[in-house]
Image (cartoon, rainbow, N blue to C red):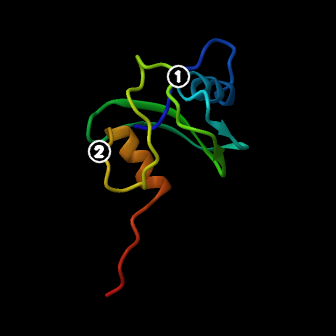
Amino acid sequence: MFPGGRKRARESEKDCLRREIREELPKLKLGRISLWKEVKARNKRSGRKMSDAIFTTKSAKGRLAIGDKKEIDRAAWHKPRGIRLTPTSRYIRDRLFPRKRRRS
């Protein structure tokens, strides 16, 4: 699952992201973050309403040490394909990393 969390009152989306990363993965330091996309839709598979601000960064340094063991049981770097994802995470992955079409 991608990291995420809920925004607090008077907190910007970027501030929320930085706080959530600090709480969940305190040894990880992100480079400059940019808003990639805001998603407000209904997930076709689950029917769940989505309202997400999705950010990207070109760099992340540090260890994946877990800060809150009640929220995360493990953290690892993976390639975008070949892992189990929630419907929302799959939606995000498929738009960030679309499958390459093979030429015939």
Residue 8, percent from left and from top: 60, 14
Residue 74, percent from left and from top: 40, 32
Report the front residue among 90 and 76. 76
Circle 2 residues within 10 Å: few <14, some 14–19, many ≥20: few
Report the front residue among 86 and 51. 86
Of the two numbered discs 1 and 2 in the rendering, the one whose residue sits closer to the viewer: 1
102 in relation to 28, above or below: below
Which residue is at the far top? 9
14 in relation to 100, above or below: above
Location of residue 101 (image quadrant): bottom left
Which residue is at the far bottom? 104
Q: Name the residue under label 2.
A: 84
Disc number placed over residue 91 in the picture, else none: none
1 or 2: tag closer to the N-terminus? 1
Task: Look at 49% across and 27% down and name the residue there.
Answer: 66
Q: How many labels does the image show?
A: 2
Task: Look at 46% across and 58% down and name the residue there.
Answer: 97
Residue 7, percent from left and from top: 58, 19
Residue 34, percent from left and from top: 68, 44
- Secondary structure beneath dot 1 equals loop
**Callout 1, which amino acid?**
Gly
Report the front residue among 61 and 81. 61
**Quarter holding the C terminus?**
bottom left
**Callout 2, which amino acid?**
Arg
What is the C-alpha distance between the residues marked 1 and 2?
23 Å
Q: Name the residue under label 1.
A: 67
Which residue is at the far left? 45
- Secondary structure beneath dot 2 equals loop
